[in-house]
Amino acid sequence: MSDFAAPRANSIEEGYLELMRKKRLYGGLTLLIFVLLMVSGFLLADSRNAGGFWDGLSHLLDFPSSVLSEASEKISLLPGIMWKVLPLLIETLNIAAVSTLVGGLAAVVLALLSTRGLAPWPWAIPFFRRCMDLMRAFPEIVIALVLIFILGGGPVPAMIAIAFHTSGALGKLFSEVAENADLKPVEGLSSVGASWMQRMWLGVLPQVMPNWMSYALLRFEINIRASAILGFVGSGGIGYELKIAMQWGQGRYDEVVAIFIVLFLTIVLVDQISSHLRQRLVKGS
Amino acid sequence: MQSAAAQAILPEVTRQFSRKRLFAFGSVVAVLGYLVYVFFAFDILGLNERARWDNANVLVADFWSYKTHVVRQNRTGDIKIAIEGENKGTWPEGKSPDWVERQGDRVEIDLGEGHRVFYEGKTDALYRFPGYGDILLGMEGRRVKLTTPDGQIPDWINASNTRVAITTDQGRLTFTRAKTEVFHYEPGWELFFFTLDSPFYGRSFGELVGLAFSSERVVPERSNIGAMWHDFWHNKMWHHAEVFGAIFETVLMAFLGTMTAALVALPMAFMAATNFSPFMLVRQFFRRIFDFARGVDALIWTIVLSRAFGPGPMTGALAIALTDSGSFGKMFSEALENVDNKQIDGVSSTGAHPLQRYRFGVIPQVMPVLLSQILYYLESNTRSATIIGAITGGGIGLLITQAMYTQKDWEEVCYYIILIVLMVMAMDSFSGWLRRKLIKGKESGLA
């Protein structure tokens, strides 16, 4: 028996080494292609940029230092400015909150309509899925700018734009959660003659709610950032004020710093609260 | 016995139920109350007054149709026919669309459904409205003279001494002392493939295919296919070459930004993970760096960076890289904290040095998780790159915001929107495909 084992072990070893060589070759090739892509990509991006990379690197701190030096001269004014921009910050937060709420509610409907086993019309599942893909693919800025043209400035265009995107993004996540839900309560409910609404409300929602809430909170964090950016590009909230202060330039850098600080603190604070809540939600389930 | 036990817990259960019900009711009331507050804070009632529904009409009409201007200078009698009134879309002298007929200084414009406009002489014009009659327009001294068949002015005619505008479903005529102008609407996107100066304009698809395979050259210096491609790609109205260049720039921004962030974040994540970095201070330092990079947010990074590097794709890529290195660092270090130590022990039992331990003990475990996160971010960053491009001035984001701020070329906006959505969906399915392929490959490799 040992006579047979030795050549077999040899051939296995050879095969293994052959496989390893191949694997290493492929790995090396992939790495090479990746490095080439990165290098050529950066060279191309650098050549299409208005200012060069190395040139810009030396000026990287010019703007922050001029902003900070102006702000430090007027440091006593900062709390007052922060107080002044507080209503705008609340508007930005409101945009994020409402769009998360409205988008989340739409996402619940879309998710239930596109989950196998729960959908009232199973033949329409692919249709609702494509709808969500399309809604996710629309960048918020596109919808917001079109709506600003029609509805005028203010928070509403940004709110609708973010809500639209949110319902697509959350709908997909919600539907993935709902797919893993236990169907036994649903079957039990349908055996006693519950309607579709009752089956979802009493059979599915209690199971998926913690995870859904956790995703919605995460989305709220993302939406605060989105709402600040949309304000900068379009209108509404603290982003718009930031844009005006930036366009004004020197002389209003104290306001720029105040907005930066307020925005930074808000984002960090909301991140902390929401990650704490999310941990409790998921652990609690 | 059982019923006694049930009796015993009944009050507790009932209380819990009523508390839950109260909580559910309370949260619904809170949400509704918040929405009512926002309803007033956002001034939804005033929205209808501020909304410009005529803008919406212009936008929707522009999305799927285009207009051709037929303009006569009333002083000289010169006629110019131009698509969207642009120089680039002007019909060459002696050529005209088939709904315009010219005989000397007499021009007949067929707007369809029996609506016709006639230009006669230098200043006379006539609008024939079927079922209503002929509306005559002319100059009387320095004033514009309007004559309707019944002597009344219907509400679709807007008339003053200096200007008359007739707006119907078929088109629009404006008459002033200086010029007479007719807008004729047609469905579609004008000159999308070839502009009027191209020899391929106005040919049917069959003709074009025939020409493509014919050896007789339309343009002497190029083959027919090459000339067609050249005329399409360098279309002066739609600038396909620039648009696709911008799309490429946006994808480039997303790719470079995401990959740079991942490369920067990976070594830093080791320093922030509890099981790889023994010193609390070092860990805290790197974690605070991640928090800072995420907290500052793409908006602020973009503003600061664009001051230093100027507009362009490099700035956008760096902004994405900075923001995401924070997110990646946090996620990677969490993934590293969840690795199984048995594999690392196994590798080190063979006498591997630390670098080999990482390479063979850690990386294979976390790679699927990291890759799937990177690919997920790549897709989402394609969308972010559009917005960041709008701020820094690069890629398709710049083109679309420029087209929107001018508020006239909405068909171009529609074109860009379609391209952006297709780009994002393509990146979505590409990253999904790659994720399935790489991670499945890894799993089967392990098994």
Image (cartoon, coloured by chain):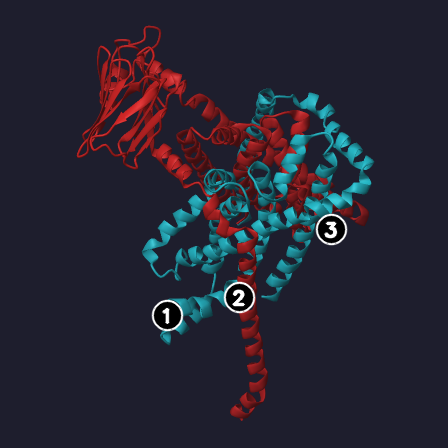
Chain colours: A cyan, B red
Name the residue at 52% across, 90% down: B2
| Kind of residue indicated by mark 1 | Ser
Kind of residue at disc 3: Thr
Which residue is nearer to you in this view: B94 or B285? B94
Is residue B331 shown to the viewer in this render? yes
Residue B116 appears at what percent x and percent y?
Answer: 21, 26
Is B422 positioned to the left or the right of B370 in the image? Answer: left
Quick check: do tags 3 and 1 share a chain?
Answer: no
The residue indicated by pointer 3 is B274
For label 3, count other residues whose C-alpha is less than 10 Å away and answer few (under 14), some (14-19) or many (20+): some
Q: In the image, what residue occupies the spot 69% across and 30% down? A: A249
Q: Chain of mark 2?
A: B
Amino acid, disc 2: Val
Tell me, yes or no, whether dots 3 and 2 are on the same chain: yes
Pointer 2 residue: B28
Pointer 1 residue: A195
Residue at the far front in the pictured view: B141
Mark 3 and mark 1: Cα distance apart in space: 51 Å
Chain letter of disc 1? A
